[in-house]
Each structure stands twice: as C-alpha cells, then as structure tokens.
Amino acid sequence: MFFPEYRARRLRRNDNLRRMVRETHLRVEDLIYPMFSAFGRNIRKEIPSMPGIFQQSVEHIVTEAKEVHDLGIPAVLLFGIPEAKDPVGQDAYNERGIIQETIRAIKDAVPDLTVITDVCLCEYTDHGHCGVIRDGDVDNDETLQLLAAEALSHARAGADIVAPSDMMDGRVAAIRELLDANGFSHIPVMSYAVKYASAYYGPFRDAADSTPQFGDRRSYQMDPANRREAFREATLDEQECADFLMVKPALAYLDILRDLRERFDLPLVAYNVSGEYSMIKAAAEKGWIDEERVMMETLLGMKRAGADLIITYHAKEAARLLR
Ligand code: PBG
Ligand code: ZN
C-alpha cells in the first residue's frame, strides 16, 4: 500500500462510505444509568457539581426510571442515601432500607428495566469508609459478611444484578456463596474488579454523601500507577465467578480496558465516573467545547478501548441522540 496508488481518503469521501467502514458502534443497549435514591418524600435535589443528576426520593426515582426505560436504556445502577448512618452501615442490609424500598418500587412500576445495585457500605457508614473499621483501617474479613448480607437483601428485594464496589479481597466469592445458598444462583455479580483510588470520584461523594470522615481509600482501592495489578484483580474475580468485570474510572484508564478486553472473555464494563461527567458539563457551560460531540466521542472511545457496557451519567442524553 503506497501513495499515490493507495489513498486512505477514498473511504472517507461521504457519509455512506464512512458509515460502511465504521468499526465501532455505540448503541443504546450499551448504556447503564446511575441513580441516587434519597430517604424521604418529595425530594429532588440537583447535585451542584453534576448538572442534570439528582438526589431524589422514591416517587421521583420511579418517574425517572420510566423515562429511562422509554428511552430504550436497558438498566439502571442504584445508590442509596439512607435516613441514618452508623459504624456498620445497617441500612445497607435492612429489608426496609432505602435501596430495598427503591428496588421494589422500580420493579413494581417498570418490571422490564434491569435493576443493578451498588453493593458497598460507604453510603451507609457514619465514617464514610467502605467497610467496618478496626484499628483505624477497614477490616477485610469482617466486612465480607456484611457485603454478602447486603447483596442478598438486594436480591430478595428484586435486584436483577448486584455490583460490589468496595474492593475487599474475596468479596465476589462471599457474595456468590450466600446468594447460591439462598436460592439466588441466577443473579449475576457485576464486579468493580479494577477500581482505582481516584480523585475523579469527588462529585459522586457529594451526590452519595459518602466522603470518608478520616483518611482515604488507598488501603483498599488500587494505586493509579499499576497495570499488572489490574490483571491480578481481574483474575481473582474471574476465579470467584464474577459475571461481569468493570474498570473504573474509564477515561484515564482506557489502556486497562484494552488490556482486560484482550485477556478476559467476560463482558467488560467501563464506569464513566462523576468527575469525568462534571468536566464535560463545566467546559460546555463555559462554551469551551461542543458538549454533544465531546460526550459521544468520549463514550465511543470507551467502546473502542474494549468496553461492552458503559455506566454513565450521560446515558439519557446519549440515548436521545442514538434514537
Ligand atoms: C462506592 C462507589 C463510589 C463510586 C461508585 N461506587 C465512590 C468511591 O469509591 O469513593 C464512584 C462513582 C462516580 O464517581 O461516579 N464505593
Ligand atoms: Zn464504598
């Protein structure tokens, strides 16, 4: 292939040709929309750093869930903001907890919408860490039982998929075992397998009210510098029978998505996190970028890197453009 006989521009001449040779496609089926369910009634509070995203009480969540379903988006990811927090995050595994009530309400009103639940304790603990504290750090093995109980209680309330995001060792196996022992062997585990200790979660912590009250999450979330460690984390979760693997955040970790795509056969999920969303919104508000085009290019980049699915706060806007 040499110029001038070969000319790459021949296949870019018009829209039909470009469509015919396009290698990657973003589809509405690829999108998962995160939602924040707040305890109380008649609450609909926009998160200042995440325009268009709300903390809302169940009745508003149900309304938005219908809208999400009507747009053709197959699934939502739920986070709960409980009435009260305590050292062991009891609301997380309470049958009448915020997320359990929300799951029931959504499944009742929009049964065809797939409900994925975030399984973690940081939204429910008063110290804001993802597990139980012993001697100033999160105790791994003690936390496992609580996470498994949380996942089971989500499944009992009607969750279709559980997604542990805590980064404790052994949690996928602990959850799988308890689900199977209680008649939920059909419920998949979407593991946040490769989750980095990232500053990109900042806006989310306002949204979920889950900022650690002391220290940070670096004793359980991964060091952003590490690539080989991502293989080890993903391998462990695969061995523990995770059904999906996730990489989070997405934008600064597209190389990790590509790596996992090449090494693992499981469906791969990218989490386009809060800070990534906020940056696009802020730049667009200033008139510095074309919001729609940058959003679609960003999501397409995640698919091209190897993601099958993308969890994104842009899901509704993207779905409207994909119709
Ligand atoms: C809870 C959790 C976090 C996110 C998803 N689940 C925050 C964290 O680990 O601090 C981040 C999502 C986002 O930034 O959009 N463990
Ligand atoms: Zn957490």
Image (cartoon, rainbow, N blue to C red):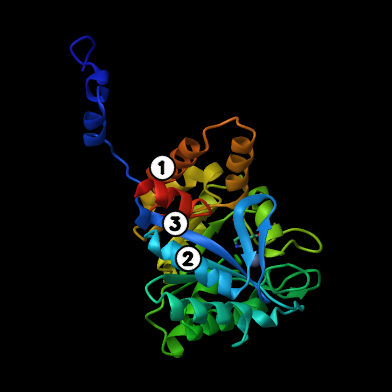
Q: Position of residue 152 (x, y in %)?
A: 52, 83
How far separated are the C-alphas under marks 1 and 2?
20 Å
Amino acid on which the number 2 mark rests in the picture: Val
Image quarter for ligand 2: bottom right
Task: Check disc 3 and report the residue beneath it.
Answer: 269
Q: Nearer the viewer, mark 1 or mark 2?
A: 2
- For label 3, the SS is strand
For the point 35% across and 57% down, which residue is it? 29
Kindly identify which numbered label has been placed on residue 153: none
Amino acid on which the number 1 mark rests in the picture: Leu
- Label 2 crowding class (10 Å Cα cut-off): few <14, some 14-19, many 20+? many
* Foreground of the two, 56 or 218: 56
Q: Position of residue 182 (x, y in %)?
A: 45, 90
Q: Is residue 297 above or below residue 107?
A: above
For the point 50% across and 84% down, which residue is it? 157
Q: Position of residue 129 (x, y in %)?
A: 72, 67
Left/right placement of residue 80 relative to residue 34 reads right
Q: Are marks 1 and 2 in contact (CB under 8 Å)?
A: no
Amino acid on which the number 3 mark rests in the picture: Val
Mark 3 vs mark 1: which is more N-terminal?
3
Q: Are marks 2 and 3 in contact (CB under 8 Å)?
A: no
Left/right placement of residue 188 relative to residue 251 reads left
Task: Check disc 1 and report the residue beneath it.
Answer: 300
- Label 3 crowding class (10 Å Cα cut-off): few <14, some 14-19, many 20+? many
Q: Quadrant of residue 91?
A: bottom right
Left/right placement of residue 121 relative to residue 293 reads right
Task: Check disc 2 and report the residue beneath it.
Answer: 76
